[in-house]
Image: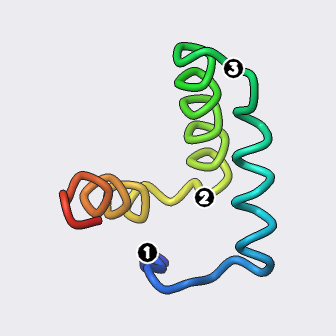
Amino acid sequence: MSALILTPNIAGADDFYADLLAAHEGLSKAESDALNARLVLLLANHIGDRAVLTEALTAAALKDA
C-alpha cells in the first residue's frame, strides 16, 4: 500500500495548472463541474489503491486543505 503524497509532486506544476484552467475555458458551471467529476474518476481509477483514495477523500474534506 502506498501513502498519499501531500508534498509537491508534479513536474511542470504551473504548466499543468495552466492546462487545467484551459480545459475549463468557455464551459458553463455545470460543464466545468462535470469535467472535474470525470477527471476525479479517471485519476481515482488510475491510482486504484482504495486506501490511498480514502486518505485523499479525508484530506480533501478538511477545510484547511
What residue occupies the far left of the structure in this picture?
63
> Which corner quadrant of the image does residue 36 belong to?
top right
Label 3 SS = loop
Where is residue 17 shown, x and y percent of the image? 70, 60
Comes first in the chain, label 1 or label 2: 1
- Image vertical order of residue 21 relative to residue 59, above or below: above
Whether residues under marks 3 and 2 lie with C-beta atoms below 8 angstroms apart, the answer is no
Q: Earlier in the sequence, mark 3 or mark 1?
A: 1
Q: Which residue appears at 56% of the width and 41% of the height? A: 40
CA distance separating discs 3 and 1: 31 Å
Q: Amino acid at mark 1?
A: Leu
Question: In this figure, which residue is indicated by the disc labeled 3?
Answer: 27
Viewed as shown, does residue 32 lie left or right of 63? right
Type of the residue with mark 2: Ile
Residue holding disc 2: 47
Q: Position of residue 32 (x, y in %)?
A: 60, 25
Q: What residue type is disc 3 on? A: Leu
Q: Does dot 1 land on a helix, a strand or a loop?
A: loop
Q: Position of residue 58 (x, y in %)?
A: 25, 58
Q: What's the colour scheme? A: rainbow
Q: Distance between the Cα atoms at labels 3 and 2?
A: 27 Å
User: Callout 3 environment at 10 Å: few (<14), some (14 to 19), or many (20+)?
Assistant: few
- In the rendered image, which residue does mark 1 sit on? 4
Taking the spot 60% from the left edge, 58% from the top edge, the residue there is 47
**Of 34 and 51, which appears nearest the observer?**
34
**Mark 1 Cα shell of 10 Å, populated few (<14), some (14-19), many (≥20):** some
Looking at the image, is mark 3 or mark 2 earlier in the sequence?
3
The residue located at (77%, 81%) in the rendering is 11
Bin the neighbour count of mark 2 within 10 Å (Cα to Cα): few under 14, some 14-19, many 20 and up.
Answer: few
Q: Residue at x 63, y 49 (%)?
A: 43
